[in-house]
Image (spheres, coloured by chain):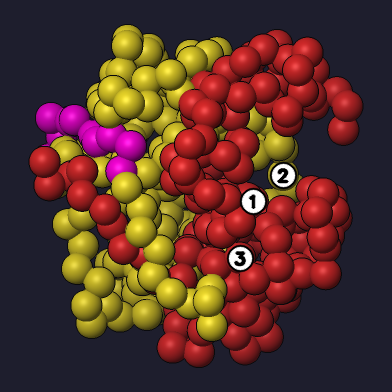
Chain colours: A yellow, B red
Amino acid sequence: MFHNKPISITPIGYVVTQAKGSEVRDKNIISQIIIYNKFIEALNCLEEFSHLFILFWLNKISTKDLPLKVHPRGRKELPLVGVFATRSMFRPNPIGLTIVKLIKVEKNVLSVRGLDAFNLSPVLDIKPYDFWDKNKEISVPKWWQSLEKEK
Amino acid sequence: MFHNKPISITPIGYVVTQAKGSEVRDKNIISQIIIYNKFIEALNCLEEFSHLFILFWLNKISTKDLPLKVHPRGRKELPLVGVFATRSMFRPNPIGLTIVKLIKVEKNVLSVRGLDAFNLSPVLDIKPYDFWDKNKEISVPKWWQSLEKEK
């Protein structure tokens, strides 16, 4: 079927961060996103939004022989659940999705807070986060709530 | 640079919807997402979340000769802004990102409300939407607010 064939995506930029290993999960960390010059015009007016979705590629993940179920955060006391029910990096298409605070835009460089991407991760897309993304009455599993309390 | 090379993504499933043209923007529309059988285990426990992020491919978009600035929603009275400051379909990597309400999961078929994807759009990833995605103090441009009021 035509909708089953591989899709080719070309990065629009990449991440620069000093954070290493689990440091990238620190929600206060400030990273830079370097956008390739050919896309600089596409950043126009971006600074009017406080928060952005960053889509990036988890380029350290091999997609070979991935398990389809994981313990959230690798925590054995939490139930084994499908990877689509988690934000695990280990997923069939390892696309990272994180909502960040935009600090500033200088030419082709964005400074953002809270991006949990490793240094040199390819960036695939940037979208503004708006009230339609936020105003939802949501519910989550009990195991998720136990993770939230730890923060 | 290694982070600049094209990335190959293989869809995990596809969208089935009766909606045509601008009908896909109806936030009450119910669509199905058919997940390929090889990924069925990855759906385990998904039904415990009320809302999901759906990442899909806007496969009707040609990425040739795209403008880098657009009027939001094609509305000439709104400012011309960079595509990364909009949710326009016309973007360098036409990845759609929509938060949907999960209605039910039956084997490899998800029924969801509010997915603005065309019939047979390839689905790239599914992630749970949680309180960390929601609890943000955000601000948006004036032109965005004028669109919200219309809804």
The answer to whether residue B50 is seen in the rendering is yes
| Mark 2 → mark 1, Cα distance in angstroms | 9 Å
**Residue placed under numbered mark 3 in the picture:** B121
Q: Where is residue A68 in the image (x, y as percent from the top left)?
A: 37, 80
| Viewer-closest of B82 and B65 | B65
- Residues in magenta, as a range: A11-20
Q: In this view, does A67 lie above or below B99?
A: below
> Is disc 3 in the same subunit as disc 1?
yes
Q: Is residue A143 left or right of residue B17?
A: left
User: Closer to the camera: disc 3 or disc 1?
Assistant: 3
Q: How crowded is mark 2: few (under 14 residues within 10 Å), some or many (20 or more)?
A: some
Residue at position x 73%, y 30% in the image = B73
Q: Which of the 4 image quarters holds residue A83? A: bottom left
Per the rendering, the mark at residue B99 is: 1
Mark 3: which amino acid? Ser
Per the rendering, the mark at residue B129 is: none
Per the rendering, the mark at residue A136 is: 2
| Mark 3 → mark 1, Cα distance in angstroms | 16 Å
Q: Position of residue A61 (x, y in %)?
A: 21, 62
The C terminus of chain A is located in which quarter?
top left
Does residue A27 belong to the magenta stretch?
no
Mark 1 and mark 2 in contact (Cβ < 8 Å)? Answer: yes
Q: How many discs mark residues in the rendered view?
A: 3
Residue at position x 47%, y 43% in the image = B64
Q: In this view, does A114 lie above or below B131?
A: above
The answer to whether residue B137 is seen in the rendering is no
Mark 3 and mark 2 in contact (Cβ < 8 Å)? Answer: no
